[in-house]
């Protein structure tokens, strides 16, 4: 018995086209991630949303991924990977259009959820596809495939910044960018012959796959670690543009910088993994990501922010693909289900816990930074200056200002998060240049401070990861090095 799996039965399979098309499909998911991040501040102002509501929209764009991973990853063996990609194609189209024509929180939330489910379908199909195409080089090829998540964030972020620079900064246009890679991967993949998965080729049944995924202690350790690595990577990345823009920086460029570094490092993953070992890479990543995130939560100047962002990027760049690769190599019978569970746990944790909680933390600390006297003055002047304006946006701002003023007069404190929302309503009304400027001068520094504090709350997770990966690395060294389990041999 050899350690090499037999070739896929379809003799017309084109590995190069399938791998390239998979990369473009991943670009669609990452452009969606980048553009949703880039428009969060605009959505907050136009629809007068709290940080927590924006966190739920950003979170839906993540935990929807988990739903589709959990539901469809086990079906990659039975219905095929091409069928999953056809479903993702439809989801990217419908979700983008839903957000473009959104009328409020519910439709924004629904569109983000549909796009996220399409993103999950891409990973449910393409991770086992890459493993099937390159069974002897999984970790390196998965890292190279996942180059195009940060790579797509760079492309989407630069495109969004360029649209702002030429005066076409409408958030609807930015979401429309998702449709470009969507149509390209649809053209490349939806009629192409696909191979069977590794599990099918090795004769691993559904029962064995579930047993390996749910009854293996090492798998549970990796699932717990995945919840934390995903939170450390994707939670702060989701908030970087909005937090830094509120402080006067071009936050989308910092996001582009972070993801550009991640793309370069993932492309060179082969050199790093072969020299250090996968568990050693994860151990170093925990140290760097914690250090970078802690620094990012304190610094405010341009050069210092980019320096902290560099350390953070070097720390998180290998987390996601290396975690997937280790599971595929150490628990190979888990197959597409194991990879799907890893993605499910990671994205569900970020979407349901990390992103909303970061928003809640940001709301709390931002409120504490709002200067009471200045805010009350702005609210009183809003009622006097704009009280007779009948425009709906202006009336909404006046009503919000009056409610906060009334609450302050009766309670002696500004209500949270109503105060920040009232300031956002004034900014969104765009009715009086002086009032808008004063409201921005109050809210911007407060939102920036609250957001940076929310980064700080993620740092302890890196300490827990440091302990987990130290144990795994020490065990590998004691056993003579990192070992890969052959699927054929174990079957």
Image (cartoon, helix red, strand yellow):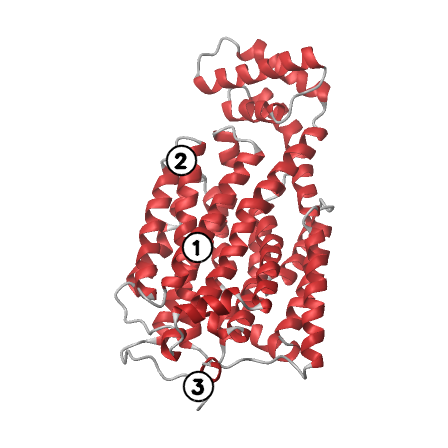
Quadrant of residue 130 within the rendered picture:
bottom left
Residue 35 at least partly seen: no
Residue drawn at x 48%, y 44% as measured from the top left = 60
- Side of 146 where 295 appears, left or right: right
Q: Are marks 3 and 1 in contact (CB under 8 Å)?
A: no
- Say which of 67 and 139 sits in front: 67
* Disc nearer the start of the sequence (1/2): 1
Name the residue tied to disc 1: 29
Q: Secondary structure at mark 2?
A: helix
Q: Are marks 3 and 2 in contact (CB under 8 Å)?
A: no
**In the displayed structure, would residue 65 be above or below residue 139?**
above
Of tags 3 and 2, the one toward the viewer is: 3
* Disc nearer the start of the sequence (3/1): 3
Residue drawn at x 30%, y 76% as measured from the top left = 13
Q: Secondary structure at mark 1?
A: helix
Q: Residue furthest bottom?
A: 1
CA separation, marks 3 and 2?
Answer: 49 Å
* Disc nearer the start of the sequence (3/2): 3
* Quarter of the figure with the C terminus: bottom left
Mark number displayed over residue 107: 2
Of tags 3 and 1, the one toward the viewer is: 3
Quadrant of residue 476 within the rendered picture:
bottom right
- Say which of 202 and 227 sits in front: 202
Mark number displayed over residue 4: 3
**In the displayed structure, would residue 428 be above or below residue 261?**
above
Of tags 1 and 2, the one toward the viewer is: 2
Residue drawn at x 73%, y 47% as measured from the top left = 299
- Side of 417 where 164 appears, left or right: left
- Side of 301 where 23 appears, left or right: left
Residue 23 at least partly seen: yes
Q: Position of residue 223 (x, y in %)?
A: 57, 61
**In the displayed structure, would residue 301 be above or below residue 6?**
above
């Amino acid at each position: 018995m050899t350690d090499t799996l037999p070739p896929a039965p379809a003799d017309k399979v084109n590995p190069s086209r399938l791998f390239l098309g998979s990369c473009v499909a991943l670009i669609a998911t990452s452009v969606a991630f980048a553009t949703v991040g880039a428009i969060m501040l605009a959505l907050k102002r136009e629809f007068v949303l709290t940080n927590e509501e924006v966190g739920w929209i950003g979170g839906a764009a993540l935990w929807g991924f988990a739903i589709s991973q959990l539901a469809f990853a086990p079906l990659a063996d039975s219905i095929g990977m091409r069928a999953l990609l056809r479903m993702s194609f439809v989801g990217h189209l419908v979700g983008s259009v839903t957000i473009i024509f959104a009328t409020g929180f519910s439709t924004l939330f629904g569109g983000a959820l549909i796009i996220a489910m399409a993103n999950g379908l891409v990973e449910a199909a393409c991770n086992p596809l890459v493993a099937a195409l390159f069974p002897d080089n999984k970790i390196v090829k998965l890292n190279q495939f996942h180059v195009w998540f940060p790579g797509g964030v760079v492309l989407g972020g630069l495109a969004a910044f360029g649209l702002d620079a030429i005066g076409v900064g409408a958030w609807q246009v930015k979401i429309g960018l998702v449709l470009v890679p969507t149509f390209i991967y649809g053209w490349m993949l939806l009629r192409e012959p696909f191979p069977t998965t590794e599990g099918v080729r090795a004769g691993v049944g559904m029962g064995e796959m579930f047993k390996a995924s749910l009854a293996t202690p090492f798998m549970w350790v990796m699932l717990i670690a995945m919840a934390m690595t995903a939170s450390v990577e994707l939670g702060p990345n989701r908030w970087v543009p909005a937090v830094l823009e509120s402080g006067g920086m071009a936050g989308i460029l910092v996001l582009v910088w972070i993801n550009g570094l991640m793309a370069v490092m993932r492309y060179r993953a082969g050199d790093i993994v072969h020299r250090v070992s996968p568990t050693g890479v994860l151990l170093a990543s925990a140290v760097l990501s914690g250090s970078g995130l802690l620094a990012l939560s304190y610094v405010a100047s341009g050069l210092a922010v980019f320096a902290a962002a560099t350390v953070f990027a070097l720390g998180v760049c290998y987390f996601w693909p290396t975690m997937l690769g280790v599971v595929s190599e150490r628990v190979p019978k888990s197959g597409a289900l194991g990879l799907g569970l890893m993605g499910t746990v990671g994205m569900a944790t970020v979407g349901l816990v990390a992103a909303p909680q970061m928003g809640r933390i940001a709301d709390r600390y931002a409120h504490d930074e709002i200067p009471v006297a200045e805010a009350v003055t702005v609210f009183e002047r809003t009622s006097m200056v704009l009280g007779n304006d009948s425009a709906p946006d202006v009336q909404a701002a006046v009503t919000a200002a009056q409610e906060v003023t009334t609450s302050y007069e009766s309670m002696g404190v500004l209500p949270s998060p109503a105060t920040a929302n009232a300031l956002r309503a004034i900014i969104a009304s765009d009715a009086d240049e002086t009032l808008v400027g004063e409201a921005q001068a109050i809210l911007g520094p407060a939102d920036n401070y609250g957001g940076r504090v929310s980064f700080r709350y993620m740092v302890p997770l890196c300490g827990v990861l440091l302990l987990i990966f130290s144990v795994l690395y020490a065990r590998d060294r004691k056993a003579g090095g990192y070992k890969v389990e052959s699927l054929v041999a174990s079957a």
